[in-house]
Image (cartoon, grey):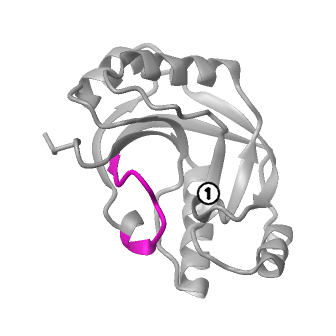
Amino acid sequence: MPNITCGIVAYWLCPAEPAGSHFCGIISDLAGRFDAPVFEPHVTIYVANGGSESPAAILAQLVKGREPYRLFVRGVEYSDKYTKTLFVQLAPDAELALLSEDLRRASDSPGDYQLNPHISLLYKTMDEETKRRLAASIILPFTAVNFSRVKAVLSPAEIKSRADVETWRVIAECSLTA
């Protein structure tokens, strides 16, 4: 098992097809156009402070028997935060909030993560006008996104650069069953 004491473990909800491929295409296109990192589309549902617990065991225990999630799109937005440069804001979901809280309780090093479901599309420091134009230009062909997998990802505690993103490593994953 990887050493998780030097960073955090982020738990991701990953989109099912066809949305997964659609988001991958947008992320790849934007990364190429703006010299930014390519990353897997995901919703971060919880972040633990890298304790001694086994993310694989936590996922096996907490995800077993949970059905896939369906989250509704609120719109494409942007912010000054590097990891939310450009993102798809999703509506809050009570069942997803319960999973996030279950992950918090299962962690022996709980973090103070506040669930705000969104799918980032671009990580890049850029001017507000460019972000505004990009957000306005992205039209999604769906109003809801299905999610079928949960992953545990080893990550640096802070994500401020392409190099930080490129260190991410999936250390466990589990399917949601219908």
Q: Amino acid at mark 1?
A: Ser
The answer to which quarter of the image holds residue 4 is top left
> Can you identify the residue that label 1 sits on?
120
Foreground of the two, 42 or 154: 154
Residue that appears at 80% across and 68% down = 135
The answer to which quarter of the image holds residue 90 is top right
Magenta residues span 153-163
Residue 65's spot in the image, x, y percent? 44, 13
Foreground of the two, 80 or 92: 80
Q: Is residue 159 magenta?
A: yes
Image height of 15 relative to 82, above or below:
above
Residue 16's spot in the image, x, y percent? 54, 43
Q: Is residue 101 shown left or right of residue 157?
A: right
Image height of 77 relative to 175, above or below:
below
Residue 78's spot in the image, x, y percent? 75, 62
Residue that appears at 59% across and 77% down = 29
Q: Is residue 33 magenta?
A: no
Image height of 146 relative to 23, above or below:
above
